[in-house]
Amino acid sequence: MAIPICGPKLSLCCLIISVWGVVMLGLLGVFFRIQSPALAEDIPINKDEWAQTQYQYSYIVEKYNQNSTNCFVAAGAYVGVFAISFIMWRVNKRADYTMS
Amino acid sequence: MGSLFRSEEVTLSQLFLQSEAAYACVSELGELGLVQFRDLNPDVNVFQRKFVNEVRRCDEMERKLRFLEKEIRKDGIPMLDTGDNPDAPAPREMIDLEATFEKLDNEMKEVNANAEALKRNYLELTELKHILRKTQSFFEEVSDRSGRREESIGLLGEESMYGVGGSQRLGFVAGVIHRERIPAFERMLWRACRGNVFLKQAEIDTPLEDPVTGDQVMKSVFIIFFQGDQLKSRAKKICEGFRATLYPCPETAPERREMAIGVMTRIEDLNTVLGQTQDHRHRVLVAAAKNIKVWFIKVCKIKAIYHTLNMFNLDVTQKCLIGECWCPVKDLDKIQMALRRGTERSGSSVPSILNRMATKQAPPTYHRTNKFTDAFQSIVDAYGVASYREVNPAPFTIISFPFMFSCMFGDMGHGLLVSLFALWMVVKEKQLMANKTDNEIWNIFFGGRYVILLMGLFSIYSGFMYNDIFSKSFNIFGSAWLVPTSRYNKTNIHKTPDFVLDPAHGDYSGNPYPAGLDPAWQLATNKITFLNSYKMKISVTFGVGQMFFGVCLSVFNHRYFRKPLNIFCEFIPEIIFMTCIFVYLIVLIFYKWIAYDAATPCAPSLLIHFINMFLFSYVKEPCSSAVFYSGQVRFQTFLLLLALACVPWMLLVKPFLLRQEHLGKIKLGGDTEPLSVRSGDIMGDGGESSHQELFDFGDIFVHQAIHTIEYCLGCVSHTASYLRLWALSLAHAELSEVLWSMVFRIGTTMDGFSGCVVIFLVFMPWAVLTVGILLLMEGLSAFLHTIRLHWVEFQSKFYHGEGYLFEPFSFEKIIDTKVDE
C-alpha cells in the first residue's frame, strides 16, 4: 500500500483542478491550432522579428502552432497530475475507510 | 392558480379528545405534521401544568441517555443509525423504558465507580513500583558512597565508627509528586528545613493515568533524607501541602526486593481484573449503542406529546381535553383520519372531534413547498413572511432570481463551473443529505442547490448572450463584420495600430450576428463603451419590466381582499405614472435601436432628452438633443403632466372617499352597523366590530401620503437601482479579463517551448483565483444584489409580508432540530 503524500482535501482539490486543466488546456490547444483570432493577443509576437520577415503570415501561424503545442504539453502534464492525485485520493479514501 | 401563488387556506379548529385517547391522537398528529397547536394556557406557569410530571420524567430519561451517549463516545463505539422511525411508544411503555434506562444507568455508574477504584489502586501500585525501582538506585549510591567512606575511615582508625553510626540514624520518606511541582517543592523544603534535608528525585519516564479525569500526568519519584523527628514531621507536612503521595519504603534491600516482588504480582492481578471490568463495560455499551438512537427518538416523541398536551384545556368533567389548532383546510380529511386512527389505537369508544371555528385572528401563512421551491420560498420568507393569502412572490422569483443573477454573472465558463458544482449536489442529494454536518456554510450551499443550479444555467445563457467565456468570445455563426482587403492589406498593416471598422463604409455585412454579441467586439478598443451603453439600456428595460409586473401583481391582492378603492386610487394611477415616465423611456430605447444606424447623421442622446423632458427645455444644439420626431414636445409635456396629475390622485382621493363613506354611515345612524369590508384597509373579517372607533382620518391620510411619496420617489430610485445589473456585469467581465491577461497571458506569451512549463505553472493559480474571486466573491456579491433587487425593488410594489409562519407540530422537525443541536 502506497503512503499518502498529500491529505484527502489536497488530493481532491488537485484532482478537480487537473481535470479542469486537461479539458481547458486541451481545448485551448485546439483553438491555438486553428488560429482563433480571439487568442490573437495571447501569442508571443515580437514586432521587430515580424518586421524582419516582411510581415509574413507564416510567422503568426508558426507562433500559433507553437502555443498550441505548449498547451497540449501542459495538458499532458495535467494528465500526470491527475493520475498522481487520483492515486493519492484512492489511498486516502482507503485509509479513511480502514480507520472508521 | 397553483398552490404557491397564495398561501394555503388555514382554519382554526377545536379539538375534543377523550382523556384516554388524547395521547394516541396527538401522537398520530405528530407523525402527520399538519397541525399547529395554540397554547390555551399561556399565563400558566410551566410547573402548574397538567403533565409536568411526565415531561420531567422524560427529561430525566434524556439525561440518562445523554450520559450513556457520552460514555459510548468516550469508548469510540460506533452508534448504529438505522434511520428507522419508531412510533411514539404507548404511555405504559414509558415505565419499561424508564426501568431499562435506570438499570443501564446504575450499571454504568457502578462499573465506572469500580473502574475508578481499581484504577486508583493500580496507580498507587505503579507509583510504589517506580519508587522501589528508583530508590533502589538512590540507596545503592548512598551505600556505595558510605561503603567507600567506611573504607576510607577504616583506614583512618577508630573514629570511623561515628560516621557509620551517624548515617545509621538518617531517616527518609519516599513518595511521588507531580513533575511541575518539583522546583517549588525543592525550594520550600530547603527553606523550611534550613538546608538540613537532602532531596533526591528521579523522573518516571512513562506518563501515569489519573483515575478520576483519565488524563495522562507526568510524575517524579523523590526521596528525602533527614535527621531527627522534628525534621521528619516538617518534611511530611510539606509533602502533604504539595499533594505528594508518600509510600512506606522498607529500609533494607532484601525487604525492598521482597516488597517489589509482591507489588509486581499484585499489579498483574489488578491488570486482569481491570481488563475484565473494561470488557464488561464495553459489552454493556455496545448493547446500548445498538438502541440508543431509537431510544432518543422515542423519548423525544413522548416528551413532545406531553408538551403539546400541556397546551390543552381540561374540560369541567375532566373527561376530555380541549385544544385549539390551525390546520390547512385541504388536509382536514387527513387530520380526521389520523384522529380516528389514534382513537382506535387507544381503544376508546368515544370518537375524537375536530370542529372548525370562526375567528378574527389572521391565520398563519402556510406555503406547501417541495425541495425545489423550498429555497426560493425561504429567500422570500427571509424578508418577511407573506400576510395570510397574499400573493406570494416566490413562484416568480424562481425565474427572475436566477435571471437577474445571471445578468451580473454572465460568463459561460463561470456559469458552467457553478452549474457543475450544483449538479453534483443535486445528483448526490440523497448521499449528501444522509451524512449531516453542522458546517453552516456547506448547509447554506446545499440548501440552495437548486437555486445555484438555476443560477449556473442562466449564467451560461447570459454568457452566451454576452459572448463571454473566461473573457474570450466564440465565433460560432461567423462574425458580421468584414475587413475589406482593399483598405487593410499587408502594406499598411503595420502603419496603423488601430483599424476602424465603419459600418457606413460597408465593413458590416448587414445581417447581424444571429444570437448574442458579435465576437468581433472582443478585439475592439471601444468594446467597453459599446457594452456599457448596451447593458445599461438592458438593465433599465429589465428593471422597469419587473417593477411593472410587481405593480400588476398588486391587483390580485386588491381583488382578493375586495378593495376596489385600492384599484382605482392606487393601482391605476401607479400604472399611469410608471407608463408615462419609464415605459416611455423604454419605448425610446427600442426606437433608437431600430430606427438609427451608422448611416443616420445624428442619433438622439436619450439621457439628455429624458432630463430635458422634466425641465421642459427643448434646444436645437447640439443635434443629439434636438427633437427627433414631430410632436415630441407636445407629447412629452402631456406625458409629464399626466404623470404629475397621478400624484394628487394617489394622495388625496382614497382618504377623502373613505372619510365621506364614514360620515355617511354615521348620518344614517348606523352606529352599531359595521363599516363594510369594501372600504378597504381592513383585511377580510378582521376587527369588524371595533372598526368604527378606529377610523382616524389623520392616520389614513399620513399613511396614504407615505405610500404615495414612497412610490413616486421609489420609481425613480428603483429604476436607477437596476443599473447595478450593468455595473456588476461590467465589474465581473473586467475582473475576468484582468485575471486572464495578468496571469494566464504570462504563460501563453512565453516565446519558445519553455512556454509549456510556464503554462502548466500558471494554470493552477489562475484556476484558484477564478474560483476564489470570480466564482465565490463575485458570485456572492451578485447574489446579494439580486436578493436586494427582489426584496426592495420588486416586492415593495405589492408585498406586505406581515404574516407569521405556519409551524406544524411534527415529530420529524423536532427530531431533526434535535440532531442538529
Image (cartoon, coloured by chain):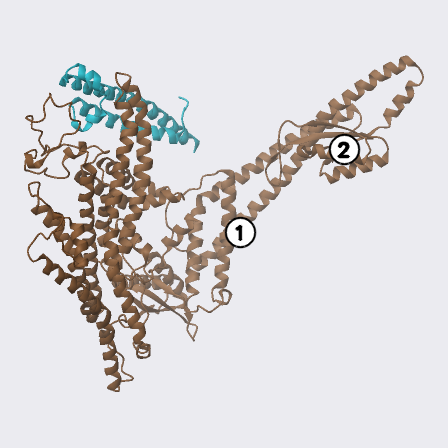
Chain colours: A cyan, B brown
Q: Which residue is at 89% across, 14% downward? A: B154
Residue B10 visible in the shown view: no
The answer to whether B289 appears left or right of A66 in the picture is right
The circle drawn on residue B248 is 2
Q: Mark 2: which amino acid?
A: Pro
Q: Earlier in the sequence, mark 2 or mark 1?
A: 1
Is B714 displayed left or right of B324 in the figure?
Answer: left
Residue B164 figure quarter = top right
Q: Which quadrant of the view contains residue B778?
A: top left
Few, some or many C-alpha atoms within 10 Å of disc 2 (few <14, some 14-19, many ≥20)?
A: few
Q: Between B767 and B186, which is closer to the camera in this rendering?
A: B767
Label of residue B102 in the image: 1
Residue B591 coordinates in the image, percent (x, y): 10, 50
Position of B543 with respect to B181 (left or right) is left
Residue that sits furthest to the front in the current view: B621
Quadrant location of the N terminus of chain B? bottom left
Q: Residue B697: horizontal and vertical position, in percent? A: 29, 76
As measured in the structure, the alpha-carbon distance from the residue carrying label 2 to the one carrying label 1 is 43 Å
Foreground: B51 or B406?
A: B406
Q: Amino acid at mark 1?
A: Glu
Tell me which residue sits at (31%, 68%) in the image: B362
Above or below residue A6? Residue B99 is below
Q: Element type at marker 1?
A: helix
Residue B763 image position (x, y, % from top left) = 30, 26
Q: Is residue B188 above or below residue B147?
A: below
